[in-house]
Image (tube, coloured by chain):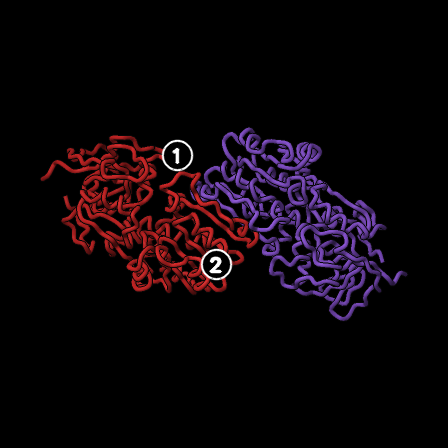
Chain colours: A red, B purple
Amino acid sequence: MTTMMKQWVMASRPVGLVKSTDFRLEEVPIPEIREGQVLLKTLYLGVAPVVMRYMTNETDFERPMNVGDVMIGRGIGQVVESKCSAYKVGDILQTKLGWREYSVIEDDPYYLTYKMRNTDLRASYGVGALGLNGFTALVGMREICQVNPGDKVLVSAAAGGVGSLAGYIAKALGASQVVGIAGGEKKCQMLTTQLGYENAIDYKSDDIPEKLDQYFPNGIDVFFDNVGGELLDHVLGRINRRARIAICGRISEYLIPPDEYHRPRNLYRIGLKDAKMQGFFIYDYKKRYAEYEDQIAEWIREAKLHPLEDIEEGIECMPGALISLYEGTNGGVRMVRIDTNIDTDGNDNKPHR
Amino acid sequence: MTTMMKQWVMASRPVGLVKSTDFRLEEVPIPEIREGQVLLKTLYLGVAPVVMRYMTNETDFERPMNVGDVMIGRGIGQVVESKCSAYKVGDILQTKLGWREYSVIEDDPYYLTYKMRNTDLRASYGVGALGLNGFTALVGMREICQVNPGDKVLVSAAAGGVGSLAGYIAKALGASQVVGIAGGEKKCQMLTTQLGYENAIDYKSDDIPEKLDQYFPNGIDVFFDNVGGELLDHVLGRINRRARIAICGRISEYLIPPDEYHRPRNLYRIGLKDAKMQGFFIYDYKKRYAEYEDQIAEWIREAKLHPLEDIEEGIECMPGALISLYEGTNGGVRMVRIDTNIDTDGNDNKPHR
């Protein structure tokens, strides 16, 4: 039995975009657990843009990352040893595993641990449709945007982790039209052929205002935004009465200083149109994750939602998988499979240690 | 018995700010009513900034005003003759009376008629605290801003029709601090001595960012905005996590073209702080007016809310009362008493014809 494992630590705090030298791979012993703890074997790690915010400590996070710390990251792991009454061997948990092959967690609110319910579906969905990506898409579309039957809906970064699920969810809630924005012909084709969008706008080559006018001749009811900046301004210029805008991300602004942010012309239309714009933080909704998981699992079983996964293999891939997110190269939910021995269908839920 | 009455019509569509020549006073016969109609004697007419939007037809109103039409305006009237089963002689109604001494209405949704319940209180409150001003302040503070105990609250145009009630309502909902913004020393004194605000900021003489930093060293939880523009931007720069901003009005922008509107630097903070910004239209909440009226009446009886009224006398005052609103001269709820024979305590609810 192996006694050593690999883990990534933050080698330096990023300046500008993260780069490979900001990370260092270490080999360390698999930890022992104490009373009240469980040992998890990492199955999949998610790759989410928020990780860079942890590294730069831009926001006032509860526990900021420092140089030398194990990289923070959520994923799904299986309990292989338990001295904690809350979790038993075999349970599949979504939690703050960190970028490592095994991790020790406790039944502590810090970890925001969520025990998966729909384990008949692929385990990898725990990083995507049945995890925070899916819950974020559902909260944004249902709680924030309150999509109603007949709404005309727009999603930006529509081929990304959350966006690849948001279009399906809007349709499942009754939207009459769902348009996605993504970069490049390949991703735009993905939107209309694999991700349930009726129309796609290519922000790299299309005239965005012209395309918005073409696809929304009667205005936009709902905008699920992952981009911010000038795109948001174009949309504000075309919102309908009682429109709803969920601010899920602002990827256009993550790499530039605030004084270079686009200054919108059309903010006044929020008041003029009795519209709503709202940011949200998915952890504020954690009491409802079980309900969200069951709803999305039901849509998957009914073939109303088809998760698209973008899986890389092996813990060595982690930094590159994160860096390339900012280069806009992925389609679907980006994740890395860490336990390369498990069945990719995710039906092998037995302990793997 | 008199058979003639006075009424104001729109003489020309305003260009820029409304001016006195945009109105014409006429003398016409008091109308006869048909089956299904009631005749109302006007007691008080409200003076609201939205009237200019009706005149310019800036928004897509259901029935736009044309030159020669009787001026649209809400107020309170008493039923003096009824051929409509919905209303009986003596009822006090809030409705679209128009700027005239008598009016005929029907039981039609267009009029958005609301029958007053708390007629033991002053009838004039029907234009203010127990009418759309009060309901707007309550919807903004409670439904949109969801004021919670301990919240730090800011209100702009705080001495105005809605603002003069919003501070009291925030306190009644448990806000720990309520700061108002108004123009001029007199109004600022009014805020802290008559309108329940702890602190006042004078936008004409104070350094607004400095005062915001002084009164909100730990940030702003709730902003009830009637002004928009640069002030809104300053506030966005100081919002707390999960802050809520109700866009009730944008008086800073009503008199300039959109391309001169302030372009905010700080909109990105809506996403960064998981905050909400929302406009609203009080008529969208009409099913709940009775509940709102009863709640505000209760606060008045408990002396938690003290309505401040700014009453002018006689229908001849109407254009001047509206025009001076845009010059920022009022404090409290601006209205004009039309039936100058009624008891100013409003306890005389008998028919006056």
Chain ID for label 2? A
Disc 1 designates what residue?
A: A60
Task: State the residue at coordinates (50%, 34%).
Answer: B219
- Along the horizontal axis of the image, is B140 left or right of A35? right
Chain ID for label 1? A
Q: From where the camera sits, is residue B222 visible?
A: yes
Task: State the residue at coordinates (71%, 53%).
Answer: B116
Image position of A52 with respect to B110: above or below: above
Quadrant for the N terminus of chain B in the image: bottom right
Task: State the residue at coordinates (15%, 46%).
Answer: A352
Q: Residue furthest left?
A: A1
**Res. B70 image quadrant:** bottom right
User: Where is residue A283 drawn, in percent x and y?
Assistant: 38, 43
Residue flagged by tag 2: what amino acid is it?
Asp
- SS at badge 2: strand
Disc 2 designates what residue?
A: A221
Q: Residues within 10 Å of mark 1 (few under 14, many from 20)?
A: few
State which tag comes first along the sequence, 1 or 2: 1
